[in-house]
Image (cartoon, rainbow, N blue to C red):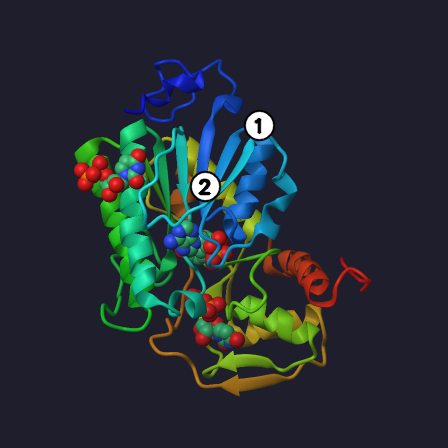
Amino acid sequence: KFSHPHRLGLGSSNPAGKIPLGLKRKGLRIVVTGGAGFVGSHLVDRLIARGDSVIVVDNFFTGRKENVMHHFGNPNFELIRHDVVEPLLLEVDQIYHLACPASPVHYKFNPVKTIKTNVVGTLNMLGLAKRVGARFLLTSTSEVYGDPLQHPQKETYWGNVNPIGVRSCYDEGKRTAETLTMDYHRGAGVEVRIARIFNTYGPRMCIDDGRVVSNFVAQALRKEPLTVYGDGKQTRSFQYVSDLVEGLMRLMEGEHVGPFNLGNPGEFTMLELAEVVQETIDPNAKIEFRPNTEDDPHKRKPDISRAKEQLGWEPKVSLRKGLPLMVSDFRQRIFGDHKEGSN
Ligand code: NAD
Ligand code: UDP
Ligand code: UDP
């Protein structure tokens, strides 16, 4: 039988992952599921830099060892190859639960596996949180709003989701994950936090994950046409990854359960995004129209007043500032180090 997390030296006043006054954060042990992925690896960097001990749990479906390799050899870092659909026994104070493919191309690849990851995977991590008294943070998504009939989207909106469509494995999976999270909170007293993340971009995104920012950037760098799906008038709001990570950490450390929208309210049509990519990389890049995918949401823009008020958080990096940071990373990964011009 495993004991409670107090063996971590935090004292018995830490029943649910709270940091007792006067004790240093470096006593915390934190699990990041999906920590070898795009967002997770940036979060891990911040937690390690803060002095925490981090255990990354990842099955490497879309994550890569390269994203966390710089921590190998650090005694505060551990990497476990594990699928969250299977039970897991660990002793920790906080769980950031990110494990789940995020790009439509990846989550549609094996939809049943996506549902299992969201439902069974989240159940297992909540069971773990309950057993050890850890605080649990779910990374949910703006997709819970589906093709929204309210604009911008507030957390109080219940959404417009097709339950039987090709995106449902992800949308409904995350909605169920939110339900499970709240039921463990209400029923078992688990301390939980819910973030609803809007489209996020930055270094370490998979180059060929099919998401619009990674596609446009890779296409412009490779001198290929930018593929705009549909008429390109659908909108998204793009958040730079460092802003998201700051929001996730504030949410975990704060007092509020949420859900909280974490996103950048700057709203762009896909054609406008293509223009920003042209400005940033190649003014001569061509645009090519392609048929859109099924059930594509027409517009999306977060109302972030709740996060502003309750977490004191708002994004700082505009698309025009953030994009060049991602471009230099993509340039290096596509062309190799010998290519100059990393911004
Ligand atoms: P990502 O695909 O880069 O990272 C997901 C990570 O989870 C990968 O390392 C992958 O290998 C791992 N993983 C997937 N299934 C797993 C399983 N069954 N067991 C263990 N590990 C598993 O995606 P990301 O962009 O870093 O997204 C992280 C989280 O944020 C996801 O939960 C995603 O739904 C959520 N989110 C992201 C965005 C975004 O725009 N990036 C938007 C909304 C929500
Ligand atoms: N679980 C886990 N690690 C733990 C505790 C539980 O993976 O440290 C899993 C467990 O296998 C179960 C799920 O979490 O499938 C839910 O656990 P809980 O104790 O809430 O429910 P029960 O085991 O009673 O179904
Ligand atoms: N999209 C596009 N060209 C691409 C990839 C995507 O025009 O090469 C569009 C897609 O139809 C959607 C938007 O960009 O309207 C955002 O798609 P993405 O897959 O990045 O994320 P989503 O918000 O749909 O999960």
The C terminus: image quadrant: bottom right
Q: Who is closer to the viewer here, 296 or 78?
A: 78
Give me the disc on residue 32. Answer: 2
Label 1 – label 2 distance at C-alpha: 15 Å
Q: Residues within 10 Å of mark 2 (few under 14, many from 20)?
A: many
Q: Position of residue 46 (x, y in %)?
A: 57, 38
**Going by the image, does 277 lie left or right of 112?**
right
* Residue at x 35%, y 15% (from the top left corner): 13
Q: Secondary structure under badge 1?
A: loop
Give me the disc on residue 10. Answer: none
Q: Amino acid at mark 1?
A: Gly
Ligand 2 quadrant? top left
Q: Circle 1 sits on which residue?
A: 51
Q: Secondary structure under badge 2?
A: strand
Determine contact: label 1, label 2, CB under 8 Å: no
Q: Residues within 10 Å of mark 1 (few under 14, many from 20)?
A: some
Q: Is residue 303 visible?
A: no
The N terminus: image quadrant: top left
| Looking at the image, residue 60 lies above or below residue 108 | above
